[in-house]
Each structure stands twice: as C-alpha cells, then as structure tokens.
Image (cartoon, rainbow, N blue to C red):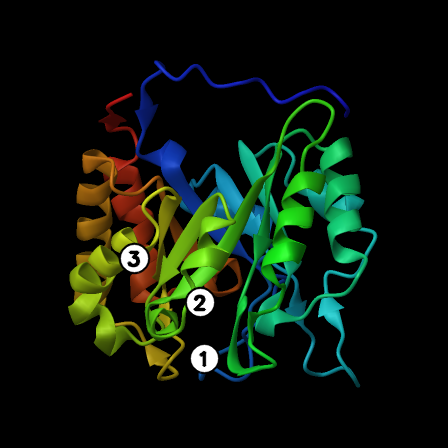
Amino acid sequence: MTAARPQENPMTTSTVRDKLWLWGHESGSHDDGANIPGSSRIPPAEAAYYLNIPNLIMVRYRDYDAPGIVLLPQPPYDQYALALSPLKQLVWSFVNEAGVTDDQEVDRVIDLAGKFPNITGAMMDDFFLENPTDGNIGVHTLDQLSAIKQRLTLPDRRLDLWVVVYAHNFDMPVADHLAACDVVSFWTWKAKHLADLEANFARAEQITPNNRKVLGCYLWDYGDKKPMPLDLMQAQCRIGLDWLKQGRIDGMIFLASCICDHRLDTVEWTKQWIADVGDEPLAP
C-alpha cells in the first residue's frame, strides 16, 4: 500500500457526495457525557457505509472509563486504517479530542499515511485553548505549526493540515494560526447559536480568506447535551448545500459516526438528504 493516491483532475465535475465527510470516533465514544440515549456499537467504517459518505476524519477520543488519559484507538493504527482504506479520503488526527497530543503523534500519522494512500490530511481537533497561558492560544505555536506542515510533505504527496475552529474562538487572535493551516473546519458548538451561522461564517471568511473551509454539522446538540432540533439540522444542511454550490465551502462534515446507530431523527433525515442530493454535480 505504497502507491500514490491518484491526483484529481481540477476540471473533473465533483458531486455533492464527493464533498461530504463523516467525523469518526471509536464506537461508544459518546455513550456518556452528552445525554445520548442508549449505547453505540457502530464503528466508523460502518457508519460511513450507512450514510453513504465517501470521506472520513478519524479522531482519537478519550476512554473516560480508563484510569488516566487513554485515547482510542490506541496505536498502532494500521488495522483501523485498513478498514477505512476503501474510502475516497481519510484524514487522521494528531491533536485529538480536548486538544490532547504528544510528541509522537505527528510521526504516527506520517507513518500511517505512507502505508495508506487514501490518507490526505492530518487533523488538529480542539486546537484553541479555553484558558490560554504564556501567550499561547493554541496547542502548538506558530513555529511548531510551520515545522509540522513541512513534515507533512511525503515522497508522493503532501498532506493537508486541518484545524477545528469554533465560532466563539474568533474572540481570540486566531488569524495567524489559521493561516498556517490548509483546511479550516468551522463549527457552532451550541445549536441555539445556529441562528447566527451565516453571520458567523461571514466573519470566518474575513479572518481566513486563503483557507479552504469546511462546514461542521453536529447531529446532536453537544453544547447543551440534548437532541439537535430537526429544523436546525435541515437549515444547516440547506445553507451548507448553497455554500457548496457557490464555492464558499469545500465540504461538509457530519459529527459523529458513533451516534449513527441510535435512530436519531437527525441521522435518519441526513441519510435521506444525502441520498437525495448526493449525486448533484458541482461546478469544477
């Protein structure tokens, strides 16, 4: 598994489905802490198959039942990546849930990408700190980001550097850190703030004029630990589809794989929405 991933022809017409991503966690990751009913057994690959989404972002998540800080999946990641190798694109985290990372995480992602040609990027989840100290607002400094980005150049391709940013992060001086990244995934933490989605995203566009941007869409209201209202789910999908067609965003992410087997209204509606619009062409 060392062959280069085929390069896409920029003149090839993409479909809406080509631009859709699933946010992946180990099954059961969200069983506790968000008031989601029941327990989940669905792994990321099955969730992507269920929703018919061709791209996935795999993010390591803390096992809160284990003593200390234990993230799942545990390395080595090869067997996990093998199950996801039929997908069109795979992005793997090196800054994980709650901003947890270590000195070996970048090495692990680079090593994995050398074995699996569908890995196209490296993700920094929860990158910006809630309580910055010593003037550092992110998990990595600007100099560290520059060094990491250089290391993401492989012999056969360059991995994109992805980052998570929430609408409320724009109250901090985040512009330089975001400019160091290739892809900015934009999220609204609480469903009640989706009323301001268009205004907040316009602000994101001003702050990140040169980044590719991807709209994050929660399938559950994690911020207030309750179901995502179906009308808000529908609204963010409608807005996201418009922005895709206008070229304002490069994709949409649905979070998360580990709640796709709960028969939530938002999941089932989104599944049908993808079936309805997924094959619509997008301008090259």
Residue 205 position within the rendered picture, expressed as x and y whole percent measured from the top left: 27, 51
Q: Indicate which disc residue 19 carries.
A: none
Task: Compute the Cα span from label 3 to label 2.
Answer: 33 Å
Tell me the quarter of the picture where residue 245 sits.
top left
Task: Please give the name of the residue rendered at 25% of the width and 46% of the height, measured from the top-left corner.
Answer: 273
Element marked by disc 1: loop
Q: Which one is in front in this view, the residue at disc 3 or the one at disc 2?
A: 3
Element marked by disc 3: helix
Residue type (three-letter) at the residue carrying disc 1: Pro
* Residue occupied by mark 1: 37
Task: Compute the Cα span from label 2 to label 1.
Answer: 8 Å
Indicate which disc, 3 or 2, sits on the residue closer to the N terminus. Answer: 3
* Residue occupied by mark 3: 204
Indicate which disc, 2 or 1, sits on the residue closer to the N terminus. Answer: 1
Residue type (three-letter) at the residue carrying disc 3: Ala
* Residue occupied by mark 2: 262
Compared to 116, does 132 lie above or below?
Answer: below
Residue 178 position within the rendered picture, expressed as x and y whole percent measured from the top left: 45, 55
Task: Please give the name of the residue rendered at 19% of the width and 36% of the height, measured from the top-left corner.
Answer: 246
In this picture, residue 244 sits left or right of residue 267: left
Q: Does residue 2 appear anywhere in the picture?
A: yes
Q: Nearer the viewer, residue 120 or 64?
A: 120
